[in-house]
């Protein structure tokens, strides 16, 4: 943010609905999921731009769950969000309308046979997104046996380039055997919580002391906020996706592409680039019609903007200047 601001941009980083200090949601597993649907996330972004006194912005940039939120913002309202950068979560695009007679309503993601196939593996597994949709997930993490501080430290470490085993590759397809090749933070052991999963990969005291991209002074902010709110607000977005409850609403934009200048930035050691087989290529070739580039930064895992901030800032400035020059 300081690098972009120094270049003359007004930079705003909001907490999405469900996180931090943003209101308009309740941390209730049995509560209304509709505030967390993607169309409402886009509406929030439009409202924020208007509240700041603008009718459009140079770009919307999003990391992790912010990546689809940014992508959908640019797809739905290209007049407001005039460029987009997605980070660490490829946007595979919007499926076209299925033409002809249909056998019935589409199957929600939670009903995908892949889940039973994972459970039936010799080493029984489960997908983290399905686990994040369970009632127990919030308490498992907020009240982790190792404490919230060590849980978040372990989680950030496990998904970073600091772990030599994070050497991702394109998976052959969406089968249990294929996706079970991913680390346990994506395809978990069936009988493990996420807190138990990351506890087995806790960094050493020396590694923590040497960590320059997430010192304890910054980690404390995460611990404070998640200790105050819990994780359920963030987990609701997983439940929206796994339930399929709002999939029909998104068919309003069936077949639409992102037609504003776009780019994708991620860590080369980030398994998130490949967790959905084919998504990276679909984004590059079909979902975005003005893709400026796909940039995988070496020495970064999932937290690319923290692990390699100078390179990310440089790529963002290069992209934004290129967009401005082309107008």
Image (cartoon, rainbow, N blue to C red):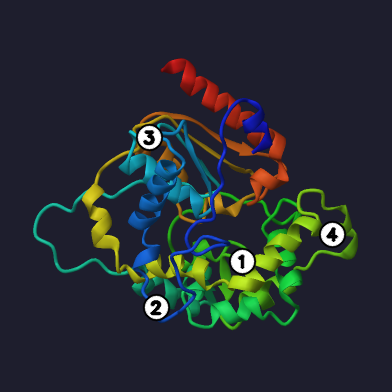
Q: Earlier in the sequence, mark 2 or mark 4?
A: 2
Looking at the image, residue 189 sits to the left or right of residue 325; the answer is right
Q: Is residue 221 above or below residue 63?
A: below
- Name the residue beneath numbered marker 1: 185
Query: Pointers 2 and 1 in contact (CB under 8 A)?
Result: no
| Quadrant showing the C terminus | top left
Q: Earlier in the sequence, mark 3 or mark 1?
A: 3
Image coords of residue 34 (percent x, y):
34, 67
Looking at the image, residue 200 sits to the left or right of residue 236; the answer is right
- Name the residue beneath numbered marker 4: 208
Q: CA distance from mark 3 to mark 4?
A: 44 Å
Q: CA distance from mark 2 to mark 4?
A: 38 Å
Between disc 2 and disc 1, the foreground one is 2
For disc 4, the neighbor class at 10 Å (few under 14, some 14 to 19, many from 20) is some
- Name the residue beneath numbered marker 3: 55
Q: Earlier in the sequence, mark 3 or mark 4?
A: 3
Q: Is residue 36 above or below residue 258?
A: below
Image coords of residue 27 (percent x, y):
49, 75
Q: Residue at x 31, y 39 (%)?
A: 257
Q: CA distance from mark 3 to mark 1?
A: 40 Å
Q: CA distance from mark 4 to mark 1?
A: 19 Å
Query: Does residue 313 appear in this view?
Result: yes
Residue 152, by quadrant, is bottom right
- Name the residue beneath numbered marker 2: 31
């Amino acid at each position: 943010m300081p690098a972009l601001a120094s270049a003359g941009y007004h930079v705003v980083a909001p907490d999405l609905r469900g996180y931090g200090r943003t209101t308009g949601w309740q941390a209730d597993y049995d509560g209304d999921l509709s505030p967390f649907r993607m169309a409402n996330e886009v509406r929030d972004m439009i409202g924020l731009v208007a509240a700041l006194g603008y009718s459009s912005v140079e770009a919307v940039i999003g990391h992790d769950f912010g990546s689809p939120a940014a992508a959908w913002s640019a797809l739905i309202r290209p007049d407001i969000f005039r460029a987009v950068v997605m980070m660490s979560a490829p946007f595979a695009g919007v499926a076209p309308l299925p033409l002809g007679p249909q056998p019935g309503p589409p199957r929600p993601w939670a009903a995908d046979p892949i889940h039973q196939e994972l459970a039936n593996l010799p080493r029984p597994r489960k997908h983290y997104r399905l686990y994040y949709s369970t009632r127990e997930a919030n308490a498992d993490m907020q009240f982790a046996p190792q404490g919230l501080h060590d849980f978040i430290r372990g989680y950030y470490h496990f998904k970073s380039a600091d772990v030599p085993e994070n050497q991702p590759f394109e998976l052959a397809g969406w089968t249990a055997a294929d996706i079970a090749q991913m680390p346990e933070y994506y395809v978990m052991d069936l009988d493990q919580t996420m807190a138990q999963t990351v506890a087995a990969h806790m960094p050493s005291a020396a590694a923590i002391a040497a960590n320059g991209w997430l010192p304890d002074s910054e980690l404390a902010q995460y611990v404070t906020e998640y200790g105050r709110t819990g994780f359920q607000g963030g987990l609701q977005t997983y439940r929206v996706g796994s339930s399929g409850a709002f999939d029909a609403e998104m068919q309003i934009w069936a077949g639409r592409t992102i037609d504003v200048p776009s780019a994708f930035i991620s860590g080369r050691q980030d398994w998130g680039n490949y967790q959905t087989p084919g998504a990276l290529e679909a984004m590059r070739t079909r979902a975005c019609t003005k893709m400026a580039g796909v940039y995988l930064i070496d020495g970064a895992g999932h937290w690319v903007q923290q692990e390699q901030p100078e390179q990310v800032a440089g790529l963002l400035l290069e992209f934004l200047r290129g967009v401005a020059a082309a107008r």
